[in-house]
Image (cartoon, rainbow, N blue to C red):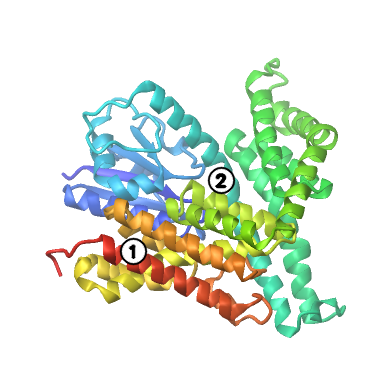
Amino acid sequence: MAKWIVAITSCPTGIAHTYMAAEAIEQAAKEKGYEAKVETQGSVGAENELTAEEIARAEGVIIAADTKVDETRFVGKPIVKTGTGDAIKNAGALIDWVIEQKSESAPDGDSVEKSNTKEIQQQKEKRSQERTGIYKHLMTGVSYMIPFVVAGGLLIALSFVFGIDAAEEKGSLAAALKQIGQDNAFALMVPVLAGFIAFSIADRPGIAPGLVGGMLASQIGSGFLGGIVAGFLAGYVALAIKKYLKLPATLEGLKPVLIIPLFSVLIVGLLMIYVIGTPMAAITEGLTHFLKGMQAGSAILLGLLLGAMMALDVGGPLNKAAYTFAITMLEAGVQTPMAAVMAAGMTPPLGLALATFLRKNRFTHDEREAGKAGLVLGASFITEGAIPFAAKDPLRVIPSMMIGSAVAAALSMWFNVSLVAPHGGVFVFFIPHAITHLLPYILSIAIGALVTAILVMLLKKPVKEV
């Protein structure tokens, strides 16, 4: 009987990495003669869910996730935990590892060695685990926040269809769209971010203090930065109370319903009001004023930095950091970084797709097929469409993408393009007033994609399989 493996994949946006990691695990298992079932926890919730019977007969479990995943179903099973990026690149090594670890769980990590005999140094592993933990907590918050960001931003953009000032007319459809998008969806972004950062740290006890801390951050004016601080504070406060407060057995039942919510909300609330909120609000306000007052030269430098970050790890921590920064500024009323980030995120897959059409002999058949998909993904602002190319030839592809994205973002900043929608790609282009200076913006993306394509074509050598 073939060995049976189960897995879960989950990325912050729940779109590309989630499903690409699942496909990589399934393909690698098939090549090794194993059977595998992968549950994807994507943007539409859990799909292809694992049953208790399937888990019970599994040789082991692979959890390839950049967000918090409930592991209680897998108690007693060997577990290999890693990120979605590692699963896409090294799915075969993961499967070998989980089969070999029947007697004990493999250590956590955000990287998997291709050779199973190579030992990971303890200090390196410790740093990797710490980095992964903080990143996962933040990305869990971001993943739950993104639907509010996208829905709110696009509804605000749609309100402009009726005119730039149409939302000022009370009772109009434009006003209703703006009310739903800006006054409600956007208003929930920071509380949801903070609430689910805390949830990632402390599980359900962290949600209440996280949401309250995030709401206070919004009211005080500390925005996303305050919300991030509130989320981590709430999570660790709730976790500390849960872990270290010892009560008599007769009172233990009060802990989750009374003690933890009351004291964690109280502590986080007081710290946000009297200690943390005001300094974070000042930092946010200072950053907003600085960005609004930027001259052309400094704006271009910021665009270069954001563009390079968007392309460097193709949907990884730096990509998400740049995107979160743009959302932070969008909420604060500074809209140029959002335009630069979206241009930079669209450029890598578009540039690589262009290269596969212009120089077919530089790419294998599979890569040319990936280029067709990359065209659609790039147009939709899904940077992960570039992953198949970056994973296969990182030394040539990643620098090319970084330069192209940096050029696109810098040009967007230079043209002073503003964007009110945080997602949507080319579909936002058809919404009137959602983008200022639309033609220069399209030109910025086109030039960035062309730069990427030219560099890739120059650096890559012809392949035998054409």
User: In x, y percent, where is residue 85?
Assistant: 38, 48
* Badge 2 amino acid: Thr
When the figure is inspected, residue 208 is found, relative to residue 25, above or below; the finding is above
When the figure is inspected, residue 229 is found, relative to residue 89, above or below; the finding is above
Q: Looking at the image, which is closer to me, 284 or 108?
A: 284
Can you see residue 348?
yes
Residue at the right extreme, as displayed: 170
Classify residue 371 as left or right of residue 207. left
Q: Secondary structure at mark 2?
A: helix
* Badge 1 amino acid: Leu
Q: Name the residue at 73% across, 38% down.
A: 209
User: In x, y percent, where is residue 342?
Assistant: 55, 65
Q: Looking at the image, which is closer to me, 382 or 298?
A: 298
Check disc 2: other Cα within 10 Å, few if <14, some if 14-19, many if 20+. Answer: many
Classify residue 153 as left or right of residue 179. left
When the figure is inspected, residue 183 is found, relative to residue 233, above or below; the finding is below
Q: Name the residue at 51% across, 76% down.
A: 443
Can you see residue 379?
no
Q: Nearer the viewer, mark 2 or mark 1?
A: 1
Q: Looking at the image, which is closer to me, 254 or 197?
A: 197
When the figure is inspected, residue 414 is found, relative to residue 102, above or below; the finding is below
The quadrant of the image that shows the C terminus is: bottom left
Which label number is shown at residue 455? 1
Which label number is shown at residue 272? none
Residue at the bottom extreme, as displayed: 162
Classify residue 36 as left or right of residue 420. left
* Displayed quadrant of residue 424: bottom right
Residue highlighted by disc 2: 140
The quadrant of the image that shows the N terminus is: top left
